Amino acid sequence: MTLTRWYRPEVTAAPFWQLSTLRDEIDRLFEAPLSEFTRASQQFLGGWLPAVDLYEDKDNLVVKAELPGLKKEEIEISLHEGVLTLAGERKHEEEHKDAELHRSERFVGRFQRSITLPSPVLMDKVTAAYKDGMLTVTLPKTEEAKPKQIEVKIN
Amino acid sequence: MKNIVETQAHRNKPQAVAEENWLLPAVNVLELRDAYLIEADMPGVSREGLEVTLEEHTLTLTGRRDAARLPGNPVYVESKPAGFRRVFEIDPTVDGGKISARLEQGLLTVHLPKAERLQPRKIAVTG
């Protein structure tokens, strides 16, 4: 007896399989020029839009932002009427100002992102950490905003 | 003079495409008197996730990000769950043995010194 590899029929069903590789191929074709375009348009529109994620668990809202190559002091975090604003400025490096620039894609200048928070938070308990170029802001929810479980008795 | 040119060669390697999807980090390439500098934005990449390799004249920068998700449920997500990779063809005048790299708050700086004999030098005039 020999062992033959078993394929799930739905995977080998040719048209779908081929379709998915074709899709991958198209994605791949589009990916590079598009990301270049986004980057170029960011520069063109005069802004840097760092990627921001918002997560929520029982007790906290957590906001994470991609801010590579900044100093802690260059990041400004503020909270006003349920809107969290992350701002700052990436400065030109004076150190190499005489260098010949062969490629310049990294954004330099001011950036700002604002996020409307989905629930009220304890303003004075907000903390922030900056590590590996990622800013993490933890915002504890107010007691009222936390989900509560109540027991309903059936008579 | 070739200096530092991005290569598309990695796109032809099927494993690079099949295994993982990569983001292209934004880079600056600078030329100093005695060296080239490549600066690459790699937010979320720690030293453990970083790999800089030189093969012949091909310099590959790879940054893997910790896949650990934030606690709780995503409400709004803009980041992409992928690492960074970019490949450069470097000038043959770069002294491969002396390349060094530094990673600071998600900003990778690769220092590529030009070989001694090719650096501009002042010649003393005698007589």
Image (spheres, rainbow, N blue to C red):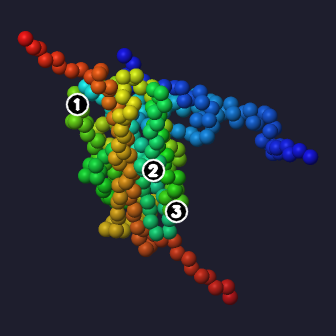
Judged from the image, the secondary structure of the residue bearing numbered disc 1 is loop
**Residue A154, image x, y percentages:** 67, 85
Most foreground residue, A86 or B101: B101
Does mark 1 fall on the same chain as mark 2?
no
Does mark 2 fall on the same chain as mark 3?
yes
Q: Is residue B123 above or below residue A12?
A: above
**Residue A152, image x, y percentages:** 62, 82
Does mark 1 fall on the same chain as mark 3?
no
Question: Which numbered disc, 3 or 2, marks the residue closer to the eye?
Answer: 2
Q: Residues within 10 Å of mark 1 (few under 14, many from 20)?
A: few
Residue at image point 45% right, 28% down: B88
Quick one: label 3 or label 2, which is nearer the N terminus?
2
Q: Residues within 10 Å of mark 3 (few under 14, many from 20)?
A: some
Q: Chain of mark 3?
A: B
**Which amino acid, by three-letter code, is at mark 1?**
Lys
Q: Chain of mark 2?
A: B
**Which amino acid, by three-letter code, is at mark 3?**
Gly
Determine the CA span between mark 2 and mark 1: 31 Å
Most foreground residue, B80 or A114: B80
The quarter in which the C terminus of chain A is drawn is: bottom right
Residue indicated by mark 3 = B72
Residue indicated by mark 2 = B48
Residue indicated by mark 1 = A97
> In the figure, is residue A77 to the left or right of B48?
left
Q: Is residue B40 above or below residue B122?
A: below
Farthest residue toward the top? B127
